[in-house]
Image (tube, coloured by chain):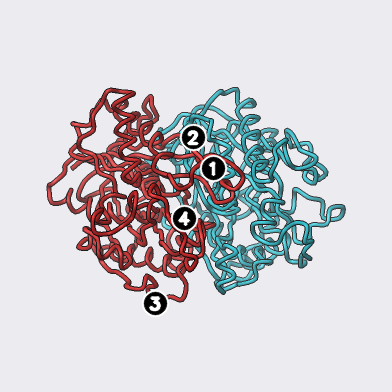
Chain colours: A red, B cyan
């Protein structure tokens, strides 16, 4: 049986395995440093569909296809999935022909890690043999839903992050695989009163601090006990704030941290201001880049923390601050 | 350990308990046949807040407060929650001060049962001691988001369902309670090509058929093995279609079925066309009415199936059909 630890971390009795992943993206993603870790890209971001929203569904479907192929599986028992579109339609339409039990999630950019954590609980309790977890975002569908019509050409402030056009999917299972999920932590909502929807990194950093710190305490570990700590997606500013918080509150340095929002685009060659974001960002970066580095022995113990800003355009218009969340998972070879 | 059965049902090894529930609603709900099963109602639907969306958050917070009180608990380990608003903000804002691990869901009107099913897997695997599940909807926030501004006074066709202004919350636990969850089934997405967003009952009935039939097969049961089968929310039309489907496909009659969308308003005295709907409908009806009837010994074995239409206004505008889902849970004293 699993054990629910003092600060909310669940210790998994039968740690499930990560088997394989798939990732697809758009043109900009294919020009970034992780281009070799995309199975497919669409130069016009449309994936042969007539709207951005339909393209986003298509991406998630393709990512799952590549993940299943790489795992040598036809089918899984459950799909855990979500995205940023209103009513999470990218995910529902992606998986409507899958004939597979479907668990719809909303955790904004934390959705992918939320799915990994839920899937881990399902597998460790033998509620499933194999599961899939997928998430997506699309720059164009997100811009017009959250901000301005694309043609308007709105100016982005330096603190803004660029929504990734991409989807990632991972297959997990009970019996075999690359590495195992040993602990999961579903975060608490943290709202520090920040109201600037163009500065999500600052809003999300305290949530990341809470969850990562809870895992450190519950597992009696420190940053150096991990080969890598990955956040997704705080961006440049948010990652710096997270490190500052750990220094100030716990006197802990985190030298071994990377953020998915920093990795997917080149800071010098691709102008994305404060980095990348979007539910597809950490899904894309983890599903192949991180997972294959683990497989190749580069990292043996990884803490993966997915952050999400649980606002909506309407909540911002109504003067609300930004509630944030971070879910975390510990992965060990 | 749990067992994953052939048609997707999970048999829970340590069936968790339903402990207590809370429900709140608006004026119309307080005038309906289930008025005695509301802990609180707001005559102007605002719950002392200045927008409908903030009122919806407030409802979910209050429902959880009443549920916790009735369960004699201060706190739970996890909250599973969701709603119909874009980016599920009613739920995130409701629980941002709860200081509790939060699992954000999107399953449209199936969200509440999705949460019950997830919570059951968590409790049965000892990943938690106590959990809360909550969901909400608000007629006014839903109308303006999905359809027309309220002042426009749009005409509703006879197949339309009326979105409930209400929230329900249930507390579950490992050790004691009213009744136990023995089986859960996370449904597959079913899309029969229906495109009329004013006829959700017809779109959702095939999904309900799939999931309820899967539970019948996996547990080797028939309608008469249950004291009650509850769907939420097919409405009058959808429930009839579901019964027709069972008759036609399986030659099974279901005399003992009720639908939450039929129960909450009076068909004769309150004009709601094809019944009620909304994530808050089944949450509200189950959390007190159903649960307290079970407690009082009226029903000993109940199959509760929550249906959801996973569309968005945008997917309808883009000519898409309506993907639907149904999650089911078996409850036994």
| Crowd around label 4: few <14 · some 14–19 · many ≥20 (10 Å) | many
Residue B333 x, y percent position in the rendering: 59, 36
Quadrant in which the C terminus of chain A appears:
top left
**Mark 1 element type:** strand
Q: Is residue B238 visible?
A: yes
**Mark 3 element type:** loop
At a point 33% along the width and 57% down the height, the residue shown is A169
Task: Return the residue nearer the eye: B118 or B280.
Answer: B280
Task: Give the mark, 4 or 3, whose residue is nearer the N terminus.
Answer: 3
What is the C-alpha distance between the residues marked 4 and 2?
Answer: 20 Å
The chain carrying label 1 is B
The chain carrying label 3 is A
- Say which mark, if any, is on residue A84: 4
C-beta proximity under 8 Å, tags 1 and 3: no
What is the C-alpha distance between the residues marked 1 and 4?
Answer: 17 Å
| Pair 4/2: label in front | 2
At a point 59% along the width and 42% down the height, the residue shown is A319
Which residue is the site of mark 1? B81
C-beta proximity under 8 Å, tags 4 and 2: no
Does label 2 lie on the same chain as label 3? yes
Image height of B195 relative to B217, above or below: below
The chain carrying label 4 is A
What is the C-alpha distance between the residues marked 3 and 2?
Answer: 40 Å
Residue B38 x, y percent position in the rendering: 74, 37
Does label 3 lie on the same chain as label 4? yes
Which residue is the site of mark 3? A48
**Mark 2 element type:** loop
| Crowd around label 2: few <14 · some 14–19 · many ≥20 (10 Å) | many
Image height of A287 relative to B290, above or below: below
What is the C-alpha distance between the residues marked 2 and 1?
Answer: 17 Å
């Amino acid at each position: 049986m699993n054990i629910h630890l003092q600060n909310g971390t669940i210790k998994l009795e039968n740690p499930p395995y990560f088997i394989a992943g798939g990732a697809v993206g758009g043109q900009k993603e294919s020009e970034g440093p992780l281009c070799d870790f995309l199975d497919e890209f669409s130069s016009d971001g449309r994936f042969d569909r007539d709207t951005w929203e339909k393209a986003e569904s298509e991406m998630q479907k393709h990512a799952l296809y590549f993940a299943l192929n790489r795992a040598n599986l036809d089918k899984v028992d459950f799909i855990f999935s979500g995205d940023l579109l209103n009513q999470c339609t990218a995910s529902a339409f992606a998986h409507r022909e899958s004939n597979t039990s479907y668990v719809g999630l909303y955790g904004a950019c934390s959705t992918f890690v939320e799915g990994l954590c839920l899937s881990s609980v399902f597998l460790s309790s033998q509620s499933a043999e194999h599961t899939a977890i997928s998430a997506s975002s699309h720059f164009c569908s997100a811009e017009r839903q959250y901000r301005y019509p694309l043609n308007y050409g709105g100016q982005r402030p330096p603190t803004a992050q660029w929504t990734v056009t991409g989807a990632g999917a991972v297959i997990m299972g009970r019996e075999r695989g690359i590495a195992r999920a040993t602990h999961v932590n579903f975060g608490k909502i943290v709202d520090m009163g920040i109201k600037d929807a163009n500065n999500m990194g600052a809003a999300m950093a305290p949530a990341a601090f809470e969850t990562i710190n809870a895992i450190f305490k519950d597992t009696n570990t420190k940053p150096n006990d991990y080969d890598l700590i990955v956040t997704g997606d705080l961006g440049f500013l948010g990652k710096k704030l997270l490190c500052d918080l750990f220094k100030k509150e716990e006197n802990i340095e985190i030298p071994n941290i990377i953020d998915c929002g920093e990795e997917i685009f080149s800071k010098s060659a691709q102008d994305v201001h404060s980095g990348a974001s979007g539910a597809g960002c950490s899904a894309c970066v983890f599903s192949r880049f991180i997972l294959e580095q683990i497989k190749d022995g580069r990292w043996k113990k990884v803490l993966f923390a997915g952050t999400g800003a649980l606002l909506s355009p309407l909540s911002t218009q109504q003067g609300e601050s930004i509630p944030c969340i971070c879910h975390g998972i510990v992965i060990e070879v």
